[in-house]
Image (cartoon, grey):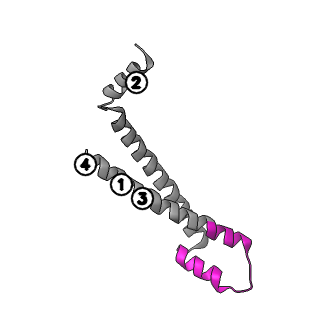
């Protein structure tokens, strides 16, 4: 039995009818994992600063002439987390639609 046949046997024993089906499940697991990761990071910043990102952004931008590089870096990181979370949440929905249609 060659490697390809061995993999096919493993897929079948795990209930997958094709590599494509396995890849769909794997992609969904990755997307769910990333969603959890970025959600946790966003929650970290909310706890750290005691407010939502929109409030924090207003606070940072309201202080004209005052620069706090640590807070500005937090805002950039937080904005990235929010953006990444939304992107991965959309991917989860797409992958779930694909799985439901199959």
Q: Is residue 43 among the parts visible in the rendering?
A: no
- The boundaries of the magenta stretch are 52-76
The structure residue drawn at horizontal position 62% and vertical position 70%, both measured from the top left corner, is 75
Q: Is residue 71 magenta?
A: yes
Q: Residue 48 versus residue 96: which sits nearer the camera?
A: 96
Q: Residue 97 versus residue 40: which sits nearer the camera?
A: 97
Tell me, yes or no, whether the two marked residues, 4 and 1, touch with CB atoms within 8 Å: no
Q: CA distance from mark 3 to mark 4?
A: 19 Å
Residue 5, horizontal then vertical, whole percent: 38, 19
Secondary structure state at the residue bearing disc 4:
helix
Q: Earlier in the sequence, mark 4 or mark 1?
A: 1
Q: Earlier in the sequence, mark 3 or mark 1?
A: 3
Q: Residue 62 versus residue 97: which sits nearer the camera?
A: 97
Pointer 3 local density, CA inside 10 Å: few below 14, some 14–19, many at least 20: some
Can you name the residue that lies furthest to the left here? Answer: 101
Pointer 2 local density, CA inside 10 Å: few below 14, some 14–19, many at least 20: few
Q: Earlier in the sequence, mark 3 or mark 4?
A: 3
Quadrant housing the N terminus: top left
Q: CA distance from mark 4 to mark 1?
A: 11 Å
The structure residue drawn at horizontal position 57% and vertical position 73%, both measured from the top left corner, is 50
Q: Which residue carries the number 4 mark?
A: 101
Q: Which residue carries the number 1 mark?
A: 94
Q: Which residue carries the number 2 mark?
A: 7
Tell me, yes or no, whether the two marked residues, 4 and 2, touch with CB atoms within 8 Å: no
Secondary structure state at the residue bearing disc 3:
helix
The structure residue drawn at horizontal position 33% and vertical position 29%, both measured from the top left corner, is 14
Residue 92, horizontal then vertical, whole percent: 39, 54
Q: CA distance from mark 3 to mark 1?
A: 9 Å
């Amino acid at each position: 039995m060659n490697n390809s046949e061995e993999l096919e046997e493993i897929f079948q024993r795990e209930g997958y009818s094709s590599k494509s089906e396995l890849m769909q499940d794997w992609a969904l697991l990755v997307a769910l994992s990333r969603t959890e990761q970025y959600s946790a990071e966003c929650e970290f910043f909310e706890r750290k600063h005691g407010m939502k990102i929109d409030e924090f952004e207003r606070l940072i931008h309201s202080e004209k002439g005052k620069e706090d590089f640590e807070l500005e870096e937090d805002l950039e990181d937080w904005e990235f987390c929010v953006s990444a979370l939304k992107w991965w949440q959309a991917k989860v929905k797409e992958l779930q639609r694909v799985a439901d249609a199959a």
